[in-house]
Amino acid sequence: GGGGGGGGGGGGGGGGAHNKRRRAPPPHLVGSVFVPAESPAGAWQNHGERYNHAERVALGQLTDIATLARWRRDGRALVTTPPSAPEVGATVRMLTWRQPSYVGGRYLKRARGTPQAPWIDSETGVTIGEGSVQTSLDAVVSRAFRADGSKLNAAGREDIDVRMLGGGRPFILEVHNPRRPNAAATAEARAAMEAALEAADGGAVTAVDIHVTDAAAYRAMHEASEEKEKEYTAMCWAEKPLTLEDELMLSGIKDLQIQQSTPVRVLHRRTSMTRPRTIVSCRCERVPNASRFFTLRLKTQAGTYVKEFVHGDFGRTRPNVGEMLGCAADIIQLDVTDVVMDFANGELKGLDGDEREGKIAKAE
């Protein structure tokens, strides 16, 4: 509150300096953000640095009109009026920066321990996990487009220890400065990208239904993903052996409304609040000859924390599987088996007509 008040109450000169400071990058990013020299941002940054240097030199040497007049009398003037004719011709350099291309599809993550985006520990600087979905997709797509890189926008994300199987998770890559903007224009080229992903890293991250899409779909992806449903397969454990009645009780869950407080494991980065979520359906299967272990096949509303629905998260998710069984329960492994979202060939098909246009307009 104090910092905000101080910024608003400053005078004219102080306000200008404050605004300049606000436009500067955060201290921890200075020197660490790569800006290509040939990009418009890089050219402007270089021009700005030279201009600021010249301005500092001028201000340091010339402080008032009287000083300029004295320099002219002494023959030390840095400028003449009118200026003399230039002796060297001007050099003009034109830089081209291509509009982004957009490539969509559905990615599959078959290996646990791979995050969706590169994950670096903020305290130690150590990379967490084995690669990432984003870097695997970017390595193939950016090479095909001869691009400077890409940005991933996906319909939600799974935890690092969760696999993405089934039909895959919808995604769109914004490909930056593509020198081959039509690299995915043919079915053969798109099939080659899918084959390259399948061959890399043992197929840990692959993609299907790669297609060309547009900026409107890229911006609308998040809006559409908020209304999707997701299907999971979870291997679970219970403190007591499950009976047939327990199995039937869990299999009878349909449109169950639960209340989920922000899980303890994400409280450091998510707002603490309670959110209503729906377990659309559930099917329970006991493991033969190991009745403490069981499999849950769940369909849930987007945004449901499935791990917490099983173990309860210290009572922060209610009702939960452990509570319904009357004993402690926990989840051993979790897979996403489907993201129920009609997305193919660049279209968010679940948003037809006016509804799709409204979502795109809201995203823009």
Image (cartoon, helix red, strand yellow):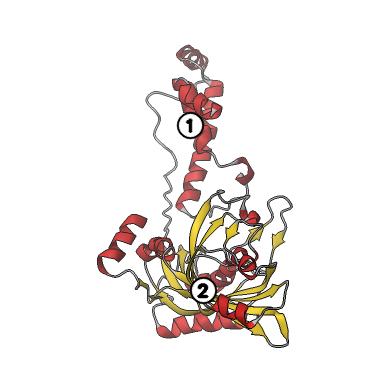
Q: Residue furthest bottom?
A: 288
Q: Position of residue 173 (x, y in %)?
A: 47, 67
Q: Helix or strand or loop: what does disc 1 sit on?
A: helix
Please tell me which residue lies in front, 7 or 238.
Answer: 238
Q: Position of residue 156 (x, y in %)?
A: 50, 65
- Structural crowding at the residue carrying mark 1, measured as other residues with C-alpha within 10 Å and reported as few (<14), some (14–19) or many (≥20): few
Which quadrant of the figure has residue 237?
Answer: bottom right
Q: Position of residue 114 (x, y in %)?
A: 64, 69
Q: Residue at x 26, y 68 (%)?
A: 353
- Structural crowding at the residue carrying mark 2, measured as other residues with C-alpha within 10 Å and reported as few (<14), some (14–19) or many (≥20): some
Q: Residue at x 69, y 88 (%)?
A: 288
Placement of 75 over or under 355, stated as above or below: above
Task: Tell me if I can see residue 343 in this picture.
Answer: yes
What residue would you read off at disc 2?
A: 253
For the C terminus, give its image quadrant: bottom left
Please tell me which residue lies in front, 69 or 296.
Answer: 296
Q: Residue furthest front?
A: 245
Placement of 187 over or under 40, stated as above or below: below
Please tell me which of labels 2 and 1 falls first in the chain: 1
- Report whether 122 appears left or right of 297: right
